[in-house]
Amino acid sequence: MNLFQIALKNMRQRGLASLLTMLSVALGVALMVAVLLIHGVLGRQFSQSGSGYNLIIGPEGSPTQLVLSTVYRIENPIQNMPWRYYKKWATDPRVELAVPLAFGDSTEQGDFPVIGTTPQYFKLPYARTPKPQSYRIGEDQSFLRGSWDAVIGSEVARRNGWGVGSQFQLVHGGQKGEDAHVHDEKFTVVGVLQPTGTPNDRSCFVHIDGFHMLAGHENPIREAIVRESQFFHESIEELTKRYEQDLINEAREQEFLKKNPKHAAHPGPDVSKEVTSILIVTKGAEGDELIRSSRALDIQSELNEDTAAQAVPPVGVMDKIMRTFVTPIQMAFLGLTGLILAVSAIGIFVSIYNSMAERRREIAILRALGAQRRTVSLMILCETLLLCLGGGVLGLLLAHGLMIITGPMLEAYTGILVNRWAVSPWELVILPVTLLVATLSGLIPSVTAYQTDVAETLAS
């Protein structure tokens, strides 16, 4: 019978104590693996979202708020910008592609954010690592074409039970029931996005032409003139003269609405249209990120001198969010799981050390039968290693089992695509560390076994 067989026999004799000790190790390892897996999911979420463009242009304010509202849709937008400002950047010689985004509405069912945009939005990759990832939809589906077309994320389709051909209405000004207005017009789903693991999965995209036609989405022209004067540094008098005919048409429309309160969707003048933010892809040869970055830096420096707008590189802000919020939480959880492993190690030490008093006679008999001191000491170490190895393997299985079971629930509640079969590279370190902890916790009991006096123990 070898040392491991003897150690297994001793563990079976102390079944309940061994099981509880192994379980404490398993819980510590499971927590540590779960933290690593969740951190990996969040890291991919932050690195993938917003990686298909160089800059986000928005009104002056907090860069973090601009990224959170534009990329993650978890903050209210700062304010809007004139449509003419978007057209300016769309024709800038340094810009390859400018995509407008308009926020402010949500779906009547499910309260998912609605984004008015153009078909060019889906030309941007939603992720660039490990290689560019493009948006995909099912067969016989299309991206935005007509004014009343809509493309919905996979999570929106799943939770609302929508598919191609489904129609829905938008809620303007907040959630339904809170002084909100439900638009009469309906958008028709023409495409359902394949899961991306980004906030796009829980978003609805409608054609910006239809979005601008809805009642309440037009900006009164006199207010729009004031906004344009801020963004283009032109006098209000000059702009008023430029848009004189639009002001006359607006006055006529207001008179008509007084007699006919029912507001029908219709296209308005460009001056009354607004965008919330603009996604910018700078020009440069494919793969030449240095030129693209240089042009993005030029635009950013130019707008830093402007008091009305800002240009924000999303990757830098996302990295800051990651370092400020996610990493400290991860470190706190890792510290907590480290303490749990330390407690487990102490539990192993106490369990085996307390059993030494009961096993002195057994050890003395082994010594009397010819077992060497070193052999008896290694037997105790083997038992400790087996307890930790069993607990470590059980912890790994427990963590991955929980990810497989809870993955769909996390996707449902957060909209984050969870790879339930993901494995963190750090898991390769966890078992060796656990065995090292086992060795340290088993040293004193093994030394005690080594020093057991055969004659004295048998005599007593």
Image (cartoon, rainbow, N blue to C red):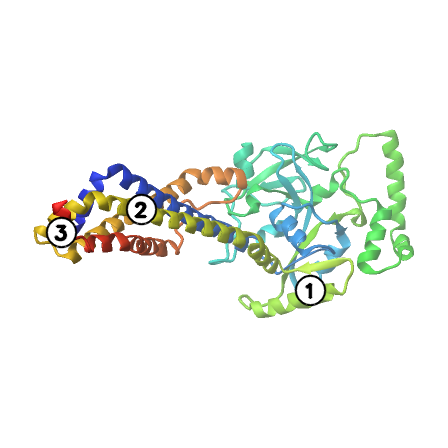
Mark 1 and mark 2 lie on one chain; the one further toward the N terminus is 1
Please state which amino acid type lies under the numbered disc 3. Val
Q: Of tags 1 and 2, which is closer to the observer?
A: 2
Which of the labelled discs sits on residue 350, or is there none? Answer: 2
Q: Answer with the quarter of the image where residue 168 lies.
A: top right
* Residue type pointed to by label 1: Gln
Q: Is residue 185 left or right of residue 144?
A: right
Image location of residue 355, percent across then percent down: 24, 44
Q: Is residue 341 above or below residue 301?
A: above
C-alpha separation, residue under disc 3 versus residue under disc 1: 81 Å
Query: With respect to residue 61, does 415 lie above or below?
Result: above
Res. 44 visible in picture? no
Q: Assess disc 2: are there few (<14), some (14-19) or many (≥20) residues with their C-alpha within 10 Å of its C-alpha.
A: some
| Left or right: where 356 falls relative to 58 | left
Residue at position x 37%, y 53% in the image: 427
- Pointer 1: what residue? 300
